Every structure is written in structure tokens, then in C-alpha cells.
Image (spheres, rainbow, N blue to C red):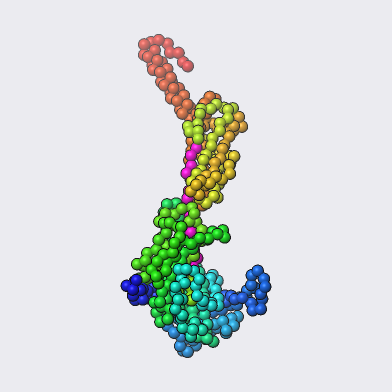
């Protein structure tokens, strides 16, 4: 355990270096909303909230009086009390998706909230506050910042500390994910990204941490996994197939979780939380399982039919997720004629034991009402979030009076042969002196 702790203390700084290298940009000036509860508004089911425009001027090194004067003109619609000069040694705010394009009205989402340090009550983080932390360090101005990049994939949550009465906070804990939205097919290996950084100059650095992954869907949740780094142990859970790379966790702060085999039950929201003594930060990400349906049409082959008859054909779509699916029928005749046949009679959804969905549609082809010529391909079309799938079956109609192209070509060939024979006979009689009979 001591070896891991030493590696953690030395190597987690690589997280900051990696972020700065990847961004390759100066830190942006970020406009945010400062959101907090309104004072004196209690007694309801939910507290009333207030929000104010705010601005963060961000540097990777501490601000100087000179650097403050070099900032852009302060916005007139933002209170001076909501201007923050942030020191971010890891450069977590400096990544490209958090830069507002010049001249664009589109900007990253950002929210600042007051933060109150307090001991964690979850079992896997309780040991972090077994020994009291310095009250002098905790007695300060604490803020949390949540931001989402313009790419829709980057999300971060930073905890910042400023001396009491100061508007110059420093980032103490940063947690970032570059997989805010992930899509996977069934059975695939899925990686949910989560990395964290702790300020090496902070008393919270190197005294232990915990990582928690939690799942939520439609108001219900469960613990997926939790790791207590201080005691080097995992919490007991009923979840299987979820893993952390402990070597990467200690070396670079990589708390990413891997799901070995994606299943329907994995579709939902995941929360990655990192605990330090009295401090925590968390990011959320969404995993969507998308599986295309398998299609089958029966009967296959279809029976031979004659004009005026009816034939029924059914299409079964199975093993798909999520449940939104559009089923329809199309027809392409042997003569190239195409026709939309509508949805047919669509059944309700049926759910299998693995969570996947099945649905079917039945089509009644009444040849007394439909002119389908000599037949063609009847196609079942399934349009799903994962794409479109088709399958077809051949319909043969016999006893149709109108000749097909093949029959017409055959009759032309026969006529040519007969014409040739007549000409040969005519030449033969002409050469032998027999009067020619003109036709």
C-alpha cells in the first residue's frame, strides 16, 4: 500500500501535464452562472434558488496585479463580487472544448455553486476523516464549478478554495470525463472515462482518496463499484463485469471504469465521484445501449398465388434496443415498379429475459385490389436508432394474362424464325421455275 501511495504522490502530476499538452491553448475567460439558495426562504419542498452572471479569469499560475489589469474589460452586466481570478495549475479549464469560438454566441455551459466541506458518510470514504484536518485550511471560501464543453463530450467538476474574503480561488480537486455521452452495442467492451487531479501543494494531497461509480435510471440507482484507496479495498457490491485499473488509478489519477460486456441493464446515467478528506467532486455521463433488430419473414418462400387471391406475410423484428422502431412494407415488381404497402398490422412490444425487445407486423396482400403484375420482391423495412435493416421474400403470381418481357421477347424470336423459313422456301421455288406465291 505504501508503494502505491508513493507512486500516487509522485505521478499524479502527470495528469496536469497531459491536460496542458493536449489543450495547447491559453486558458479561456469563462462566463458562468453563480447559483445558490436564496437566503431566508425555507419551509418548502425545494429551496428557492437565485442565479447571477459571473466571470472567471483563469491562469495556470497565480494572478499578479499586473495580470489583473491586463484582463479584458469587465462586463458591465456582471457584479464585481462575481468576478473570480482563478489559478488552475492542472489547466483543467484550458482545454479546447471550453474555449468559446471567436464571434460565436455559442459558449460552454458553466455553473458555480458555494461548496461546504464536510466529512463523507459513505463507508468507503469514512476513513478519510478518521484524523481531523486543519480547521485553518477548511475555514475558507469554497466553490464548486461544473462545466460542459462545446463538443458535448467533455464534462468537468472542480472544487476551488480561496482565502476568506478573497476572489482569487485555486483549483484543489479536478475531475474530468471525455465520455459524457457513450453509445455501445450489446456485448461490446465499454470504457467510461473519469480522471482526477489533486493540487500537490494542498494538505489534502497524498492523505488518501476514494472512488465511487454509481448508476441511475428513471429515479432508481445502484452502486456499481467503490474503491477505498486509503485501505486498499473494494466495497462489496452485487455488480459483476465492472473494473478499475488500479495501476492507472495511482499513477495518473485515471479512475475510468470498464464494463466488460455491455448489456441492456447498463443503459442509463453513471456518476463518477472522487472523495478526499471533507471534499468531493463528481461528473455524470450517459451510456446508451443501441442494438439493431434481427429480421425474419415468413412464410418463406411464399406460396404461388393467382390473381384475385390473398396472401399473408409476417415480419418479426427481434433482439433490438431501445424500443422505438418503425416497421413498414415495400414492393418492387419484376417489371421495376415500386410500391409502398404501409405498416401492416403492428403488434405491441415484447421484452426478452435479456431486456431486448421484439415486435412484428403482418401484411395482407389482397390481389383482387392490388395490381402487382406477375409478382416481385416484398420487403420488410425496420428503421431504428441504430440504423435501417431490410429483408425480403419473393412473390410469384401465376396465370396473369399480360405477357411478361421475357414472353414478349420469345414471341419476337419465334416470329423472326418463321419469317426466315418463309423467305428460304420462297427462294427455293423461284430458283426451280415454280411460280412464286407472294405473301
Quadrant in the rendering for residue 260: bottom left
Q: Residue furthest top?
A: 434
Quick check: can you spot residue 406?
yes
310 in relation to 177, above or below: above
Q: Which residue lies at the image location 60% right of the left edge and 80% below the top edge?
A: 77
Residue 297: give x, y in percent of width and height: 50, 37
Quadrant location of the N terminus in the rendered image:
bottom left
Residue 15 horizontal/vertical position (percent): 38, 73
**Residue ID at (64%, 79%):** 39
Q: Is residue 7 magenta?
A: no
- Up the image or down, 165 lies above or below 171; here it is below
Q: Residue furthest left?
A: 3
Q: Position of residue 8 (x, y in %)?
A: 36, 73
> Residue 387: in sight, yes or no?
no
Relative to 48, 7 lies left or right: left
Q: Looking at the image, which is closer to me, 328 or 292?
A: 292
Question: Is 370 above or below relative to 32?
Answer: above
Residue 284 on the magenta span: yes
Q: Main secondary structure of the magenta part?
A: strand
> Residue 211 at what x, y percent from top left?
44, 68
| Magenta span of residues | 283-297
The residue located at (56%, 31%) in the rendering is 311
Q: Which residue lies at the image location 49% right of the left edge and 69% below the top edge?
A: 122
Query: Does 248 sit left or right of 265 as displayed?
Result: left
Outermost residue toward the front? Answer: 130
Amino acid at each position: 500500500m505504501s508503494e502505491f501511495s508513493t507512486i500516487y504522490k509522485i505521478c499524479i502530476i502527470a495528469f496536469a501535464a497531459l491536460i496542458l499538452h493536449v489543450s495547447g491553448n491559453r486558458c479561456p475567460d469563462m462566463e458562468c452562472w453563480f447559483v445558490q439558495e436564496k437566503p431566508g426562504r425555507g419551509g418548502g419542498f425545494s429551496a428557492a434558488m437565485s442565479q447571477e452572471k459571473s466571470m472567471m479569469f483563469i491562469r495556470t499560475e497565480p494572478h499578479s496585479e499586473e495580470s489583473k489589469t491586463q484582463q479584458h474589460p469587465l462586463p458591465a452586466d456582471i457584479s464585481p463580487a462575481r468576478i473570480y481570478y482563478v489559478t488552475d495549475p492542472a489547466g483543467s479549464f484550458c482545454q479546447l472544448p471550453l474555449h468559446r469560438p471567436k464571434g460565436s454566441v455559442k459558449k460552454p455551459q458553466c455553473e458555480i455553486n458555494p461548496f461546504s466541506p464536510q466529512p463523507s458518510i459513505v463507508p468507503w470514504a469514512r476513513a478519510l476523516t478518521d484524523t481531523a484536518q486543519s480547521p485553518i485550511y477548511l475555514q475558507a471560501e469554497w466553490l464548486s464549478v461544473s462545466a460542459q464543453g462545446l463538443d458535448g463530450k467533455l464534462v468537468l467538476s472542480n472544487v476551488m478554495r480561496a482565502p476568506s474574503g478573497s476572489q482569487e480561488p485555486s483549483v484543489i480537486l479536478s475531475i474530468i470525463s471525455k465520455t459524457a455521452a457513450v453509445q455501445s452495442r450489446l456485448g461490446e467492451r465499454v470504457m467510461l472515462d473519469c480522471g482526477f487531479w489533486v493540487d500537490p501543494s494542498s494538505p489534502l494531497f497524498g492523505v488518501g482518496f476514494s472512488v465511487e461509480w454509481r448508476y441511475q435510471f428513471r429515479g432508481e440507482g445502484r452502486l456499481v463499484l467503490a474503491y477505498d484507496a486509503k485501505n486498499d479495498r473494494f466495497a462489496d457490491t452485487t455488480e459483476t463485469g465492472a473494473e478499475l485499473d488500479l495501476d492507472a488509478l495511482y499513477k495518473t489519477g485515471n479512475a475510468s471504469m470498464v464494463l466488460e460486456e455491455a448489456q441492456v441493464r447498463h443503459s442509463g446515467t453513471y456518476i463518477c465521484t472522487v472523495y478526499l478528506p471533507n471534499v468531493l467532486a463528481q461528473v455524470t455521463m450517459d451510456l446508451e445501449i443501441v442494438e439493431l433488430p434481427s429480421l425474419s419473414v415468413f412464410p418463406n418462400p411464399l406460396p404461388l398465388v393467382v390473381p384475385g387471391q390473398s396472401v399473408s406475410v409476417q415480419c418479426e423484428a427481434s433482439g433490438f434496443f431501445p424500443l422505438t422502431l418503425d416497421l413498414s412494407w415495400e414492393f418492387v415488381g419484376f417489371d421495376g415498379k415500386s410500391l409502398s404497402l404501409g405498416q401492416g398490422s403492428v403488434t405491441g412490444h415484447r421484452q426478452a429475459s435479456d431486456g431486448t425487445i421484439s415486435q412484428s407486423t403482418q401484411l395482407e396482400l389482397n390481389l383482387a385490389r392490388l395490381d402487382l403484375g406477375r409478382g416481385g420482391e416484398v420487403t420488410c423495412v425496420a428503421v431504428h436508432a441504430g440504423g435501417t435493416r431490410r429483408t425480403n421474400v419473393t412473390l410469384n403470381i401465376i396465370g396473369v394474362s399480360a405477357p411478361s418481357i421475357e414472353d414478349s421477347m420469345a414471341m419476337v424470336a419465334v416470329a423472326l424464325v418463321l419469317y426466315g423459313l418463309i423467305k428460304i422456301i420462297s427462294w427455293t421455288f423461284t430458283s426451280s421455275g415454280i411460280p412464286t406465291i407472294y405473301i
